[in-house]
Image (cartoon, rainbow, N blue to C red):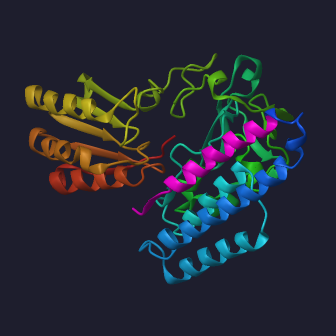
Amino acid sequence: MAHLWTRRMAKAGMALLMHATAIAGAAATPKAVAAPVAAAAASQQQQARDLAYAREYYVLRSAALSDAQRQQALGYIAARLHERRPYSEAEFLVILLRIAAFADNGHDYFDNGQGWWPAARLPLTLAAFPDALLVTHAPPGQADLVGARIAAIDGLPTEALLRQLHDYFGGPPNYVRWSGMWAIETAQILHAMGLARRADSLQLTLHRRDGRRITRRIAFVPYAAWAGGNRMHSLQREPGNAPQPLYLQQPDQLFRRLRLPEADALYLQFRSHTGSAAEPILPFIAAATQELADRGARNLILDLRFDSGGNSELSMALMETIARSVSGKIYIITGEHTFSAGIVTAAKLKQAAGARAPKVQASAW
């Protein structure tokens, strides 16, 4: 994985944001008349330096880029420098996404550290199914949208929009459908990409579950006002829905460990290979390892269908423990969203367990 930590860009973005706030507060003074012009010039110069830094320390040095991809990235940076204008924070973030996406591997990206980041998002949670983009969670005032199929966003058909998002994320189509949800759900991003008319809201054309086709403009809200949680593509907590199958239950948990007496099996589910501050991965791995050491398992089910990646090294020892401790069958379930560390983990357990581990390719839905 190639990864450029753009700390210069992060510091520049924060400085620019602070400067913009300062000049806004000085608008009544005579000196403030020239301040916006000066701020724009400073912004343009810093962004040009940041683009030169990305060119020198990523594009020209990365082994992840083929010769053709490298030339495309160099041409893209040259075109941005030729425009000679300051970009908004959202536009510049999108430019960095585009540069990393030339590698087309779903892994290369720019980390903006403590730089500018969008402060608002849609009050909806979306999920890209193989044949549709659906609303899976909505606030009480928009509850009629849960389960609705999104046909178009600001007039652009959903499938056409998802194809264009490939230019900013790279990687296989199933990865783009997963990662592209961030661009749709996050304020200003689609607008900065030229795929939405406004930065403060999106106009959705939807087919509701009752069959009605509607058009509704949805305003972005501050992250603090969003109550969607992880939810992991589950409608479990929405009103009027039937109980969910096992793999969709407890939608806000990244890691799950359950005994299934009817199958004489231990069920382990990874929905990530990184974890979060609230739910770190290492305690889960330690608990699973200890349970296998104490009780063993006749059979084991490893569910990786939502494992979008992270650090596979963290679970390598657990995969070896599983292979040693399980006396019966080991089922490895993968799906459209199994990616990166999820794929490596599946391969590691398959290698360690051999014929006892038939790999199950299942739809994530």
- The answer to if 346 sits in the magenta stretch is no
What percent of the width, then of the height, locates residue 158? 74, 51
Q: Quadrant of residue 260?
A: top left
Q: Nearer the viewer, residue 90 or 322?
A: 90
What percent of the width, then of the height, locates residue 69? 55, 77
Identity of the residue furthest to the front in this view: 30
Res 246 visible = yes
Q: Nearer the viewer, residue 214 or 165?
A: 165
Res 194 visible = no
Quadrant where the N terminus is found in the figure? bottom left
| Residue at x 44% of width, y 75% of height | 61
Q: Quadrant of residue 127?
A: top right
| Residue at x 28% of width, y 38% of height | 301
Overall secondary structure of the magenta section: helix
- The answer to if 16 sits in the magenta stretch is yes
Q: Is residue 345 above or below residue 254?
A: below
Q: Is residue 255 above or below residue 114?
A: above
Q: Is residue 156 left or right of residue 185?
A: right
Q: How many discs appear?
A: 0
Q: Nearer the viewer, residue 199 or 157?
A: 199
Q: Is residue 224 left or right of residue 38?
A: left
What percent of the width, then of the height, locates residue 77? 65, 72
Q: Is residue 17 above or below residue 77?
A: above
What percent of the width, then of the height, locates residue 319? 20, 45
| Residue at x 61% of width, y 44% of height | 14
| Residue at x 44% of width, y 23% of height | 250
Q: Is residue 152 above or below residue 230?
A: below
Q: Which residues are magenta?
A: 1-24
Q: Is residue 216 left or right of residue 189?
A: right
